[in-house]
Amino acid sequence: MTLVVLAIDALDPVHVDTFEADEFRLSTWGECETFAHMYDKPHTSEVWPTVATGKHPSEHGVTEESTSEWDNPLVDFASRFTGRLSGRHRALLGKIAQRATGADWELKEVESDTVFDGPGRVVHNWPGVHRGSELQRAWEVFQQANQSEMSTQEFDRRIRGIASEQFGWVREMLNHDLNLVASHVHVIDATGHVYRNDRERYHDAYEWTIERLEEVKSAMGPDDELLLVSDHGIETAWIDGDDNPGGHSWRAFTATTLDTRPESVFEVREWVEAHVEDTTAEEDDLDIPEEQLEDLGYI
């Protein structure tokens, strides 16, 4: 049995209802308790490490003073004093630092253990845990769209292209003997920020995500199980009570193919541990032609 965990950033139960997106409603589903520590609303870079570790940011260490790491020690030190600034101001200061010093940055990863540790468990593109560069790619599309006259077609093409890689990775992993397969997908969050006033285009993003989700379900075996989880939702212009369209909402979501589900982002790790079968398949040693690869300059 393989447990598939899809971290669908910003999947919002109110939008699931509004768009009648029943495909997200698995056997057990509902709103999930989330939290905010760095900002007034839940934030991607803090919540997903909490999901993976079961720990508060004050314990897992990815918090306002250290959401990112710079390869220039002076810039890295200075960045620790910008944590309470808005995302826009942090991005602006980051661009200035890059131009002035040539420094580059990456999202910080937790040092504590996670639910993905252990044989037969694999994870891809999980903020604070694995390949934060994938999330940075999505954020860079935001920045470029804000700084140029990017068309909606180009924005959708680039954001969905990134998300397709993550869904495709999950489908491929289901061809292997694994216990836990997990990936983070940022497409609904990205389009929610951009299409906060455009119900039709945001609805289309949900429909596109449903199509990819159905492809994953089709690749799953009869004994495999699925968990969907989000970190927050997105406020939009057409939802009563949403006074900050494009901002994060407190509405997170979980759904599972089992008869129970985690009802808080702090409960996800414990829930996953209770439903993963830790069996280990035999694996053959890899025969690497080191001398040949050295001659070709690969190693």
Image (cartoon, grey):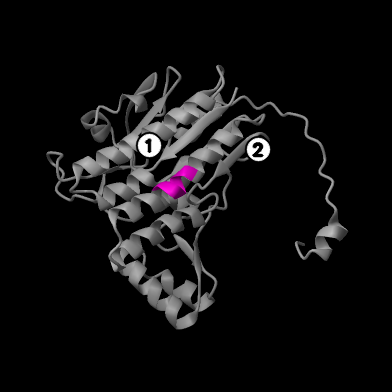
When asked about the image quadrant of residue 202, the answer is top left
Q: Amino acid at mark 1?
A: Thr
Residue 102 in percent (x, y) is at 50, 78
Question: Which quadrant is home to the N terminus?
Answer: top right
Q: Is residue 162 magenta?
A: yes
Alpha-carbon neighbours of circle 1 within 10 Å: few (<14), some, or many (≥20)?
many
- Return the residue at label 2: 118
Which label was assigned to residue 278?
none
Q: Is residue 76 magenta?
A: no
Q: Residue at x 36, y 64 (%)?
A: 83
Viewer-closest of 229 and 76 = 229
Please report whichever mark, 2 or 1, sits nearer to the chain's N-terminal start.
2
Task: Report helix, strand or loop for mark 1.
Answer: helix
Viewer-closest of 56 and 82 = 82
Q: Amino acid at mark 2?
A: Gly
Viewer-closest of 263 and 196 = 196
Question: For the residues marked 2 and 1, what is the alpha-carbon distance in whole angstroms?
Answer: 29 Å
**Mark 2 in CB contact with mark 1 (< 8 angstroms):** no
Q: Residue at x 37, y 32 (%)?
A: 210
Residue 288 in percent (x, y) is at 83, 50
Residue 132 in percent (x, y) is at 50, 54
- Return the residue at label 1: 209
Task: Please provide the residue range marked out in magenta.
Answer: 160-164
Residue 277 located left or right of residue 289: left
Q: Is residue 56 visible?
A: no
Q: Residue at x 24, y 29 (%)?
A: 17
- Mainly helix, strand or loop, the magenta region? helix
Q: Residue at x 38, y 70 (%)?
A: 81
